[in-house]
Amino acid sequence: MTAASVLVATAHFGMPVSTTHVISNSIMGVGGTSQGIRKVRWGMACNILVACVLTILAAAILRALAWLVIHSIGLVT
């Protein structure tokens, strides 16, 4: 329900999100609240956080490179 709520809200506002990241973070959050924060595997949580940040950076870099290529061949001004 948590992941679905987040995905519906982001879709409503037109925000692009990774469903994989939303679902994995929702599972971690719900597990942490229902089983106690000590049950969260923080090493895995850090890996997920790094993956989220790297995904955003990689997407931005690829988008910039694509724009440069398209702009250099004159498809956009």
Image (tube, rainbow, N blue to C red):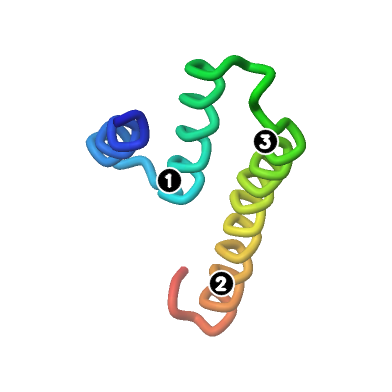
Position above or below: 65 against 46: below
Question: Badge 3 is on which residue?
Answer: 45
* Residue, disc 2: 66
What residue is drawn where x is 39% and y is 47%?
Answer: 16
What residue is shown with label 1? 17
Residue type, numbered disc 2: Ala
Q: Position of residue 39 (x, y in %)?
A: 65, 24
Q: Residues within 10 Å of mark 1 (few under 14, many from 20)?
A: few
- The crowd level at tag 2 (other Cα within 10 Å; few <14, some 14-19, many 20+) is few
The kind of secondary structure element at disc 2 is helix
Q: Between marks 2 and 3, how big is the CA–CA gap? A: 31 Å
Q: Which residue does the image show at 46% across and 69% down from the upper left? A: 77
Residue 20 against residue 71 in the figure, above or below: above
**What distance separates the C-alpha of mark 1 from that of mark 2?**
20 Å
Instruction: Say which residue appears at 63% left-offset and 17% top-offset.
Output: 37
Q: Nearer the viewer, residue 43 or 58?
A: 43
Q: CA distance from mark 3 to mark 1?
A: 18 Å
Q: Which is more N-terminal, label 2 or label 1?
A: 1
Q: Position of residue 49 (x, y in %)?
A: 66, 39
Figure quadrant of residue 3: top left
In this view, the residue in front, 17 or 22, is: 22
| Label 3 CA crowd tier, 10 Å (few <14, some 14–19, many 20+) | some
Q: Residue 49, labelled with which disc? A: none
Q: Amino acid at mark 1?
A: Val
Q: Amino acid at mark 3?
A: Ala
Total labels drawn: 3
Determine whether the residue tagged by mark 1 lies in a helix, strand or loop: loop
Given residues 26 and 67, the one toward you in this image is 26
> Disc 3 or 1, which lies upstream in sequence?
1
Helix, strand or loop status at disc 3: helix
**In x, y percent, where is residue 1?**
29, 31
Closer to the observer: label 2 or label 3? 3
